[in-house]
Amino acid sequence: MQLGGSIASAFGNIFKLERADIRILLMAGVAAGFGAVFGTPIAGAIFALEVLTIGRMQYEALIPCLMAAIAGDWTCHAWGIEHTDYSIAYLSGSAEAIGFHLDAVLLIKVGIAGIAFGLAARFFAEISHLMTSVFKTICPYAPLRPVIAGLILIGLVQALGTREYLGLGVWSPNPADTTIAGFFNPAHIDYWSWLWKAIFTIVTLSAGFKGGEVTPLFFIGAALGNALASILGAPADLLAGLGFVALFAGASNTPLACMIMGIELFGSTHTVYIAVACILAYLCSGHSSIYLSQRVGVPKTAAANDIPPGVSLRHVRDLNAQVLSNLVGRVRLRTITTSFQENLGSTHLSVLKQRMTVWLQLVVRVHSW
């Protein structure tokens, strides 16, 4: 996606296009990259429209994005490049798979899994941003950060005795290693691979440049779905497929694109389950994202209407930190005031409150700066 956007940007500069046209061209480049690398051109087009602004889509770019995504996918196939085949065997080939099918009990389990996918997406995004800040704090010299992260990863590999959490997770030279396709096997139950993969990926991305998080998120989602299937008593391949698309829907705030991606990858038999998982993951991930430059067009819930329209998620995180600091300051002020009230008379109490308020406001300002 970054390569597609970069190539599109270069064309925009060559032909000296207007700013609005460059924006559409960039979206088309992202759509081409997404459609080509995953073999899902429709999802690629919708992703490019959906990812820039939460709750709002720029439909004038629909045709350029769709044409670019189809061209990118077609080009890969023309050069003989094929994609990994992921399939859900649940109900496959049975009479129940024909037409509309819905199991109420299974739908409830899918809803629980969708909530878990959304919380895991939020965990991944927030810990990633936190670790990025930690690396910048402990090592201001940027070229040294990947060295530190590399040493941490080497230590993790030695401690776990396996290299299966390195790389994208699509393929491994060791057949015994866990891969994304392995989570679709009902006989394969793995409870902790999602967490280890998240740790390896967070350490890697936090210390270096942005990029390379999408396919690892597919791995984390499929692994978490596999683990939840065993706990909830649901089909492992179905929940692995739902986690594959739903966790990324929550982490990138693109539920429609991920719903369509699930249909393109796994077929339309489980459309309702895919939709429920993606939408719940999107809602439960909150206003967090792996892309802090995303802007809030329409807040996810009515309770979040205090978020200013058009601000980036990076600004939303700063606002939340400010609110938390103010709340902590008020709680401390009340605690100190209550303690002193037992020993001081009412005459000195008002003066003390004023002084403490000024002091705490100064602390909050310094902390925010």
Image (cartoon, grey):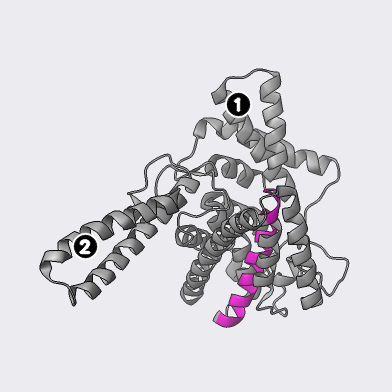
Q: Amino acid at mark 2?
A: Leu
Q: Nearer the viewer, residue 230 or 144?
A: 144
Q: Amino acid at mark 1?
A: Ile
Q: Residues within 10 Å of mark 2 (few under 14, many from 20)?
A: some
Q: Residues within 10 Å of mark 1 (few under 14, many from 20)?
A: some
| Whether label 1 touches label 2, CB < 8 Å | no
Q: Residue furthest top?
A: 16
Per the rendered image, the range of residues in magenta is 207-231
Q: Position of residue 144 (x, y in %)?
A: 75, 53
Tell me if 361 is positioned left or right of 83 in this view: left
Q: Decide whether residue 222 is among the magenta residues.
A: yes
Report the residue at 88% width, 66% height from top: 173
Residue hosting label 2: 352
- CA gap between label 1 and label 2 equals 58 Å
Tell me if 353 is positioned left or right of 87 in this view: left
Q: Position of residue 69 (x, y in %)?
A: 67, 39
Report the residue at 58% width, 30% height from top: 24
Among the two numbered marks 1 and 2 on one chain, the one whose residue lies closer to the N terminus: 1
Residue 139 drawn above or below residue 176? above
Q: Position of residue 332 (x, y in %)?
A: 32, 67
Residue 80 drawn above or below residue 109? above
Tell me if 121 is positioned left or right of 354 in this view: right
> Which secondary structure class fits the magenta region best?
helix
Residue hosting label 1: 22
Q: Position of residue 200 (x, y in %)?
A: 71, 65
**Does dot 2 land on a helix, a strand or a loop?**
helix
